[in-house]
Amino acid sequence: GLCAAAEPSLSYQELKDLKKANVLHIDVRERWEIDRFGKIPESINIPLGELMEALQMDPAEFKQQYNQKMPSKSDPVVFSCLAGTRSKQALGFAMSLGFS
């Protein structure tokens, strides 16, 4: 798996390569930002303010809300935002919930 603590940031090409593997890409920007600046293909949008709740949902509820299988605590997950601040917070949230 991907240890985010060892590799806190990825280049665009590294992300593209990872997305060929089975990595869940969660974009934690606000919905208006996605509307204005565009969606990253094959990412799911969970705004940072919803993330803690989303990662603790019942898997069926998560699938219904985000149209995506909920990640398990050991699944590789990549977070992105606009500048990197929110994705670092998202990583902290996920790790505090037991994601590796």
Image (spheres, helix red, strand yellow):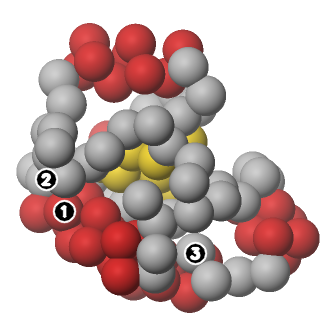
* Mark 1: secondary structure: helix
- Reading the image, the residue beneath label 1 is 88
Q: Looking at numbered disc 2 in the image, what kind of residue is underneath it?
A: Gly
Q: Residue at x 17, y 23 (%)?
A: 11
The residue indicated by pointer 3 is 55
Q: Which numbered tag is attached to residue 84?
A: 2
In the picture shown, does residue 91 fall above or below 58? above
Labels 3 and 1: the sequence-earlier one: 3
Quarter of the image for residue 30 reads bottom left
* Element type where label 2 sits in the image: loop
Q: For the residue carrying disc 3, how many other residues have a C-alpha within 10 Å: few (<14), some (14-19), or many (20+)?
A: some
Pointers 2 and 1 in contact (CB under 8 A)? yes
Horizontal side of 13 relative to 27 (left or right) equals: left
The image position of residue 88, as x and y in percent, is: 18, 62
Q: Nearer the viewer, residue 48 or 19?
A: 19
Numbered label attached to residue 57: none
Instruction: Look at the image and tell me whether residue 35 can be seen.
Output: no
Q: Nearer the viewer, mark 2 or mark 3?
A: 3
Residue situated in front as seen by the camera: 13 or 95: 95
Circle 3 SS class: loop
Mark yes or no: residue 61 visible: yes
Asked if residue 89 lies left or right of residue 95, the reply is left
